[in-house]
Amino acid sequence: MSIHSDIHEYCAGTATGPRYLVTPSTFYTTIGDKLHVSGPKGTVKLLENTPDAILEGLLNSGSLIPGSESDIDEVVSLLKKPETSRTASYLLCSATCCRDVIQDFKALCKARVLIVGCGGVGSTATMLLAGSGIRYFKIIDADIIEKSNLNRQLFWRSNDIGKYKTDVLATALKERFKDVSVEIKREYLSTSEIGECVTAGFDGVIVTADNPPTLARDCEELSRTHKTPIASGGYLHNICIANFFSGEHPAIETKNTSFPINAKNWQRLPNSVMPSFGPSNFLLASILSSSIISAIAKQSLRNVDQSIINWNANELPTVFHTHKIWPPQDEMHIL
């Protein structure tokens, strides 16, 4: 057996033993006279370069994913397609078998996702979700594109100024992903109105709109009431917060440290300028979209915990403070 294997090849423990797909992200090198294999579970040093030792090293490093011959062929097909290859390789890094990856791809393709807020965070999150394989979106926002959007929201062009963000985002999605379906709603929604949309049946929701100020926090109740995964978040000054609610647990007691006094009493200055910063937007979008992908691709990406992640965007290196919501902890702070 050679350690050098293309993605369409698989290894077998014996002639009649289990079949495995070699994860295409596997690395190997020789240090001295010893072969080292790097896989999703870590790096393994082989004591000898025999077929049995190589097979054991690949297994221990997580580089072999078991599957039937037909399942392996189906995953190989996903790996060979430019549109699905990188997502398939990503899922293989945590899948326990090829069937996990197949089922997750089907779940992603069938998923319906609601996006509330199509600004710097929402528009980017939508693109990331579409790139993962999700093909149906309902996007909601009443904002139009302004000149100040161009330096932090990368899907708009100068000649898009004055157009609705929903319209331009839908066009950009369809140009990049030919089989994507996008439903548009040009409105600002209250928390209760978002709840009414969720009842239409969605597999995941991302909320980045910031009006009312408590909207991101109120998504916990929406998620629990409608039993739907919701990722929400945003920023206050230089603090970014990303929430994920699975919709599977009872109500929790939380503290809103951003507005410690009744949030409805807070008002912006007449000439306020919000610190919507491009790098922060993209980092928020990445975390929120990853949460929804994990909630949908349940076979490969397991143990999606309800959580609150916050960080100071002005401090480098970035330090993420993660709080698991369930089981409840003493200090829960939701933006």
Image: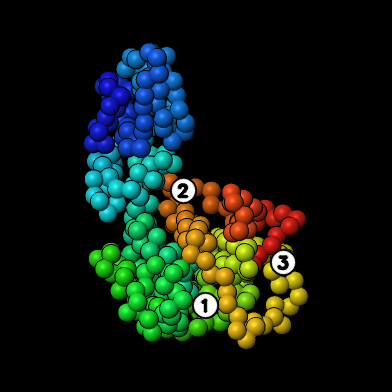
Residue 262 placement, left or right of 99: right
Mark 3–mark 2 distance (CA, rounded to whole Å): 31 Å
Mark 1–mark 2 distance (CA, rounded to whole Å): 27 Å
Say which amino acid is labelled 1.
Answer: Ile
| Mark earlier in primary sequence (3, 2) | 3
Position of residue 102 relative to residue 183, above or below, is: above
| Mark earlier in primary sequence (3, 1) | 1
- Badge 1: few (under 14), some or many (20 or more) residues near its Cα, within 10 Å? some
Residue 220 placement, left or right of 138: right
Foreground residue among 178 and 311: 311
Residue appearing at x 33%, y 28% in the figure: 18
Rendered location of residue 323, percent (x, y): 65, 54
Q: Which residue is mark 1?
A: 194
Q: Is residue 99 visible?
A: no
Marks 3 and 2 close (CB-CB < 8 Å): no
Q: Quadrant of the C terminus?
A: bottom right
Foreground residue among 55 and 48: 48
Rendered location of residue 9, percent (x, y): 24, 32
Residue appearing at x 36%, y 56% in the figure: 132
Q: Which residue is mark 3?
A: 257
Question: Which of the two discs, 3 and 2, sits closer to the camera?
Answer: 3
Q: Which residue is mark 2?
A: 301
Residue appearing at x 25%, y 33% in the figure: 6
Say which amino acid is labelled 2.
Answer: Leu
| Mark earlier in primary sequence (1, 2) | 1
Tag 3's secondary structure? loop
Residue 141 placement, left or right of 235: left
Rendered location of residue 56, percent (x, y): 40, 22
Say which amino acid is labelled 3.
Answer: Thr
